[in-house]
Image: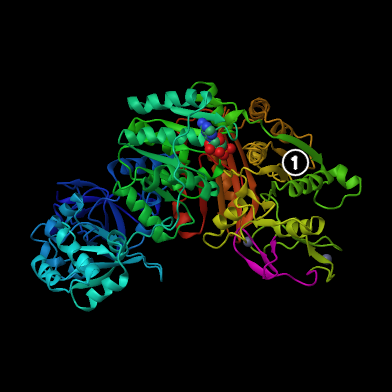
Amino acid sequence: MKFASVIVDVPVMQTDRAFDYKIPDQWQELIKPGMRVIVPFGSRKVQGFVTHLKNESEFKKLKSISELLDLTPCLTSELLNLGNWLTEKTLCFKISAFQAMLPAAMKAKYEKEISIPYGHNREMLNESIQPFFKKSTAIDWKDLEDKLPLRDIQKEIERGHLEVIYKVKQKGNKKTVKMISSNLSKLELREIVDSLPSQAMKQKEILSYFYETKNVESVSMQDLLTVLNCSDASVRTLVKKGYLAETTKEVYRDPYEDRQFKKSLPLVLTTEQTTVIAPILKNIENNSHEVFLMYGVTGSGKTEVYMQAVEAVVRKGKEAIVLVPEISLTPQMVNRFKGRFGSQVAVLHSGLSTGEKYDEWRKIQRKEVKMVVGARSAIFAPFENIGMIIIDEEHESSYKQEENPRYHARDVAIYRAKKHGCPVVLGSATPTLESFARAQKGVYHLLPLTERVNNRSMPTVEIVDMREELRSGNRTMFSTLLLEQLDKRIQKGEQSVLFLNRRGYSSFVMCRDCGYVIGCPHCDISLTYHRHGQKLKCHYCGHEEQMPNQCPECQSEHIRFFGTGTQRVEEELVKVLPQARIIRMDVDTTGRKGAHEKLLTQFGNKEADILLGTQMIAKGLDFPDVTLVGVLTADTMLHLPDFRASEKTFQLLTQVSGRAGRHELPGEVIVQTYTPEHYSVKLASHHNYDIFYETEMILRKQHAYPPFYYIALITVSHPEVTKVAAVTEKIVHHLRRQLSSETRILGPVASPIPRIKDRYRYQCMVKYKRENNLNDILKKVLEHYQQQIHQDDLSISIDLSPSTMM
Ligand SMILES: Nc1ncnc2c1ncn2[C@@H]1O[C@H](COP(=O)(O)OP(=O)(O)OP(=O)(O)O)[C@@H](O)[C@H]1O
Ligand SMILES: [Zn+2]
Ligand SMILES: [Zn+2]
């Protein structure tokens, strides 16, 4: 092919299409769709993705591709199509869609080398290539780019005899192992073995290894020592004598390498589990596509069902994608999959370094693993033979990406699963109303798990009215009942989990005399107090200032922070329960890598009585001796300007309660609240999802919210408030004329946070049931304003399924 169509990394509307480039002669055979290239664009050179090849181009005077970044496509043809679909579906730029599918390491331009993978050797390579690897098993791409027979190299890569390694620069983080190889021919080796004195047994044994074992070019020191059961002193002696050589080799950075996973075997499924897994297995068997909603109460054994279904996928020779929320990618979940499937699992989450993520991704690309367990973006795993996609805790809002491309992992999962002819399994104890409504209508196949494994009962839930506590003179943040029960657990040697709901709630600083609240100078939101370093921080723009000694308004010294952080709770708790051993888990104590896991292990080893934490302890934890869960403030989220506030409160309370009494010991939950009469709080305490669903559906219908209506949210921002208001007004006006009369258009109004980073924000909400041309109409709006977006610092963001209204 003579020409390549390339999507360039210039994310503006005018360039959101493919540009044609000439393919230089030496790369004619080499270039394939899905590869990254560098191309001249205007006066610059930019990265791009090749999407098509063609023999003709309608354009004359084309420029040539200037550099090749890949020798194997990093996007499969399925992912290229998916990118186009995402672009249509979320109104993002093509380049943003493609970039979202790749690990960060591939977004930048990294140096690369070509190397012979471990276990292979030079002789296996095509003769034209062999000379390049005479001195070393790896060569630098940059040094040899012009001289290398690229087509032959590409073939060897396809056969697995060579690999491309991107050198992600991370200081001191490159993983290497010591490799031992022989410098001599087999004949020479044998002569030396014969000439060694007979007491040099180990040395003889080591050298014999190199001429007796087929195809060993080199072996890691570690393996050599284990296989031959020898000391590294003997190996070193041979290196000193010049018979063997020692080199270092870069290997995968495996974040889980030094950990032992307890091997687990499939459990005998309960009757309910057997019933729900059957239709999933049938899908897998018949390569058919259905979306299942596994609606199972906490502790009903959903994870065991996932794992046995994944096993069936692997047996069929296919691959599985398992999505879990970032926050519950706790070691517990990873351990369960690694324990069952060992090295067949790749793990992808934000706690990994760029290099580690890239290495895990590469294992997927090279089909060295059979499954990936990961957060949202793992939905783009470049598997080519997918047999099932699982989304655990499908109600979690982290499955929606809040920046471009604004996709929901559930939609991508269903799109990919249709292409691959395989099932999607959505699991939750508290499904989103959208999913449950679809299951009710038969669009999804409902799979209920109504009981906990072994008929363990659901924990009893006690609601405590904190207003009453205050009236009866208790000014602490712990109710009398909660303290009593915590104390009882400590005496019995059982454990408790204390949950502080921090979302929608922060420790702000206020003057007690004049009521002045310290706000961010750039955003219309109060600053959050951080004890560490006595700092005030803005969570939206990062602005930071010192905690003042005086009120900036009235100079009073009575200025102090309000609200409850986990640190405060811990301090108070120590006062009232001095004998308690407490582990606190929050952003401050889990910042360092591995800290999260360490704290959980300590708690699991019963080195503490109470685990105190925020959202991050709400999910996935499974400890046998936890018999009490306390929720300090159940209702802080209820008052957020968000139509999902009740749903989120219900979900969270149910999840937290689910951490208690999962094993032999029965569990108890105490929920402290200022609004005990609210239906979310009440129904969560009765574990009654069904009534919650009905109640909430009535309200959603009344107020025209999902799942009865779809929502599109348009947010306009600009440094000048008049400009924002005017533009939003115009957009609303335009939409009123274009959209159908049943569609409701709300706005323009200031956003719930009216200013962020010195930019004013206005929004307009479109609620609709059917609007076939909505995407086109909205795209036209963007096109209309593109000049101003480009030159006048205007920003218009469109979210076609917003998960928050902020
Ligand atoms: N068939 C089974 N036989 C015995 N034990 C089981 C079985 N299935 C699951 N379990 C055990 O029951 C407990 C709860 O199961 P699991 O964690 O899979 O439930 P879950 O529904 O995923 O929970 P949650 O959503 O609350 O995190 C676990 O300790 C698990 O090992
Ligand atoms: Zn004051
Ligand atoms: Zn700010």
Q: Does the magenta stretch include residue 184?
A: no
Count of labels in the image: 1
Is 231 placed left or right of 394 in the picture?
A: left
Residue 147 sits above or below residue 155 on the image: below
Using the rendered image of the protein, determine whether residue 684 is visible from the camera's viewpoint: yes
The residue closer to the viewer here, 281 or 729, is: 281
What residue is shown at x 36% (from left), y 61% (from top)? Answer: 108
Q: Residue extending furthest right?
A: 472
* Res. 180 image quadrant: bottom left
Residue 142 sits above or below residue 793 on the image: below
The amino acid type, in three-letter code, at marker 1 is Val
The residue closer to the viewer here, 611 or 225, is: 225
Task: Return the x and y of residue 199 as percentages of the image width and height.
Answer: 22, 72
Task: Return the x and y of residue 222 as percentages of the image width and height.
Answer: 32, 63
Using the rendered image of the protein, determine whether residue 723 is visible from the camera's viewpoint: no
Residue 613 sits above or below residue 388 on the image: below
The residue closer to the viewer here, 780 or 609, is: 609
Q: What stretch is highlighted in magenta?
A: 527-552
Q: Residue extending furthest bottom?
A: 240
Q: Which residue carries the number 1 mark? A: 671
The residue closer to the viewer here, 297 or 338, is: 338
User: Whereabouts is ligand 1, in terms of quadrant?
Assistant: top right
Task: Return the x and y of residue 676 as percentages of the image width and height.
Answer: 79, 37
Q: Is mark 1 on a helix, strand or loop?
A: strand
Is 517 placed left or right of 398 in the picture?
A: right
What residue is shown at x 40% (from left), y 42% (from top)? Answer: 86
